[in-house]
Image: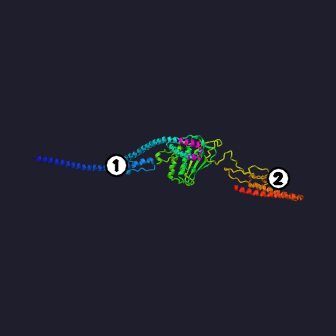
Amino acid sequence: MIQLPDLAVGGLAAGTLSALALAGTLLRLRRQQSRQRAEISALHHQLDASIRAFTAEVEHLANHRVPAAARKVAHPHLEVPGPLQPSVLGTPAGIALENVLLALQSEVSAQRTRVDAAAQAGMRGATREIQAALYRLQDALRGLQQRYDDPELAQTLFQLDHENEQSLRRAQVAAVVCGAWVGLAREESHLVDAVTGGQARLAGYQRVTVHNHLEPGTALVSHAVEPVAIIVAELLDNALRHSSPDTEVLVSLAHVHHGVCVTVDDAGLGMTRDERERAQRLVAGDDPILLTDLGDPPRMGLAAIGRLTRQFDLGVDVSSTSPYGGVRAVLRIDKHLLSRIDPEERPPAASAAPTTRKPASEQTAVPSHAYGTEHGEAEPAGHRTAPDTAPTAPDTDALPQRRRRTRPAVPEPAAAESAVPEPAAEHAAGAGWPARSPRDAAAALGALQSGTAAARAGAAELPGAFAAGADDTEQTDHTDDRADDDLADDRTEGGAAR
């Protein structure tokens, strides 16, 4: 009877402990579930924020960054905006977005080049047909010029030919920019003829002044004649277009160490630094030329120069300012493109600017500085002669030389009558004086006066010959008067010549 309650109490205690343990476990599970629900809610909020940020980043990429990246292909100076959130940079999402831009730019550049090549091919075919038609028209006009002698008709034909030449130049430049050949194969020609040919293709060619400082016979090899003419024409066209109509464009042809330079100076507005840098890039010919980069309508002059400089190994520089405030353009032609033509057998065209240099056969030697001589040759002692009666023309390449003046020797009294120069007798006979320098005239007058004084002294010593001496003296006085007049004329002529 006593043991049964103990067993019941023990069982009741065990059940109570089990219930308490189970209640604790349930409580812990509920708390853990609450924490998990909070974490899941936070993750949901974070995921929603990430999705919204990525969506905004993609929208920013599509609306702003992709168009800017596409424009940057054609205009490298433009900037592409970055992502909205700087924290995206360097992350897998940011790297993926940058790869999208790079792939887009590469594809746009490839498609742009392909489209431009197709456009150039179409224009090249069209300009070829236009050039052929213009060449036929040019031949017809020249045939009419040779057939008819009417001055008015000839003037009209010349104007039409000049207009046709300008149209031909524009078609030729467009063809060159599109990768076509220059269109003409010429024989070796004088360099000044190529420059004159480029000048003749322009409206307003009258404003161009050419200074030719080349050696006679300086020429171009056959395959460089037409490219040089095209480049000169385009440089002159830019100079004429961007300068006032009442100003001149100066062209100078000169030898340099590496060959020949053709310098074009204008008095126009000039260019800004950005314009000068872009023009220099175009004429250098290093970058590929696309029609879409030349503006609307396209300006093809500098692009054609760049194409020709790369093909024919020429050099053009437009980065300098001319002394007149405009642009200085320099075309450099290296020695391997130069040749020589005998100017006697094949002289330059009559319209070409004459050279300021003389042939080597006509250049005179520079006089030496021998003391007391006129031409560097020593004179025997006791024999001083007057300067030459005909002064030589000064050499343009030599420096002016100072000459030593010599006094004429006093003639003997016995040779007084023979001291009268022969030109005086010719003048008395009615002939004119030959060309004499003032020093020659002074020497002749001094000899005449010395001879007259000696004759008068001899006549005074002979009393029986007084009458004859008086006649001689009177005749000599007349001769002195004529010599004085001639000396005055010579001094006047010498001053005018100086």
Tell me residue 250's x, y (percent): 58, 51
Q: Residues within 10 Å of mark 1 (few under 14, many from 20)?
A: few
Left-right relation of 163 to 491: left
Disc 2 residue type?
A: Ser
Q: Furthest residue to the left?
A: 1
Tell me residue 141's x, y (percent): 55, 43
User: In the rendered image of this protein, does residue 406 appear above or below residue 343?
Assistant: below
**Residue extent of the magenta highlight:** 136-156
Q: Furthest residue to the right?
A: 464
Q: Which mark is residue 55?
A: 1
Q: Residue at x 75, y 58 (%)?
A: 488
Instruction: Say which residue label 2 marks.
Output: 418
Left-right relation of 391 to 2: right
Camera-near label (2 vs 1) is: 2
- Magenta portion: prevailing SS class: helix
Q: Which mark is residue 416?
A: none
The earlier-in-sequence mark between 2 and 1 is 1
Q: Residue at x 13, y 47 (%)?
A: 8
Visible residue check, residue 464: yes
Can you tell which quarter of the image residue 337 is in?
top right
